Image (cartoon, helix red, strand yellow):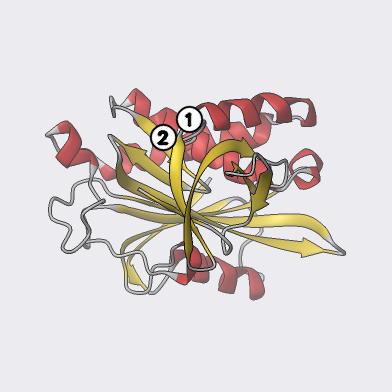
Amino acid sequence: MKIIKVNAIPSTNSFLKEALRLKSIVQPTCVWALEQTEGKGQRGSHWVAEAGKNLTFSVFFYVSEAVASHPFVLNMLTALAVKKVLKKNSLPQLKIKWPNDILSANKKIGGILIENRYQSGVLSDTVIGIGLNVNQVHFTNLSKASSLKNILGESLSLEDLLEQILERLESNLKNYDSADFGKVKRDFEKVLFRNKKPSTFVVNGKQFVGIIQGVTNEGLLRVLEEDDCVNNYDLKQIELKY
């Protein structure tokens, strides 16, 4: 895979999308920034990371027909790839907070932002952005955030982690077959944060207690509510409080 390393850019996802618009990349490509000045997060939020101490990168892939038939599998394969690498590096109590936050010991250590492109209504390629808190120690006004260094008590090589994640991610996508969807979904749900546990949610400004029942094939969160009905929600509709 081609890796482009830059000192500082506004957003690695935006960098790759512009390169695609200009048709200057035609193969799997990773852009790794030591600093993002306008990093993107879910719900339109910003990803804030101390320069040179964390991993902020995005990867461009063309997708196979198998992946295109179930676009949410991209989210699951990516989150599971990151989790596997972190487990290999001894991170404890790893969970995926729907849809794409990575937690260790109930602290957020990473996030994923996937932006897909479609042609004639069919998923054709994707830009996968990953932010991982590695060697940053202090997180001002972010009580739920932590880093690999804070949890493990030692610094890690950014380059080594990047290589491990890219290798695992590329392998997951290359080897995926449509017949694997059920297993991938089960693996994802096994590590889904608060799955099958009473949790507090907010919908339309109203707070209630529900129990996560996994996800739909399209990636919607399934929540069992007080009326014994299971309702499905997308990211913009519901917030999990923890």
Taking the spot 72% from the left edge, 41% from the top edge, the residue there is: 217
The answer to whether 144 appears left or right of 88 in the picture is: left
Task: Count residues near mark 1 (Cα–Cα under 10 Å), then give few for <14, some for 14-19, many for 20+.
Answer: some
Q: Name the residue under label 2.
A: 95
Mark 2 Cα-neighbour bin, 10 Å: few <14, some 14–19, many ≥20: many
Residue 113 screen position, x and y as percent: 51, 57
Q: Residue 151 placed where, x, y %?
A: 19, 36
At label 1, which amino acid type do we have? Val
Secondary structure of the residue carrying tag 2 is strand
Image position of 14 (left or right of 176): left
Up the image or down, 197 lies above or below 108; here it is: above
Q: Give whichever of 81, 199 is nearer the camera.
A: 199
- Give the image location of residue 60, x and y in percent: 58, 55
Helix, strand or loop at label 1? It is loop
Residue at which label 1 appears: 191
Q: What residue type is labelled 2?
A: Lys
Q: Which residue lies furthest to the front in this view?
A: 227
- Count of marks placed on residues: 2
**Which sits in the foreground, 237 or 59?**
237
Task: Determine whether label 1 and label 2 are within 8 Å by CB.
Answer: yes
Task: Please say if 23 is above or below 89.
Answer: below
Report the Cα–Cα distance between label 1 and label 2.
5 Å
First-in-chain label (1 vs 2): 2
Instruction: Please name the residue shown 31% across and 36% down the image.
Output: 104
To which quarter of the image does residue 223 belong? Answer: top right
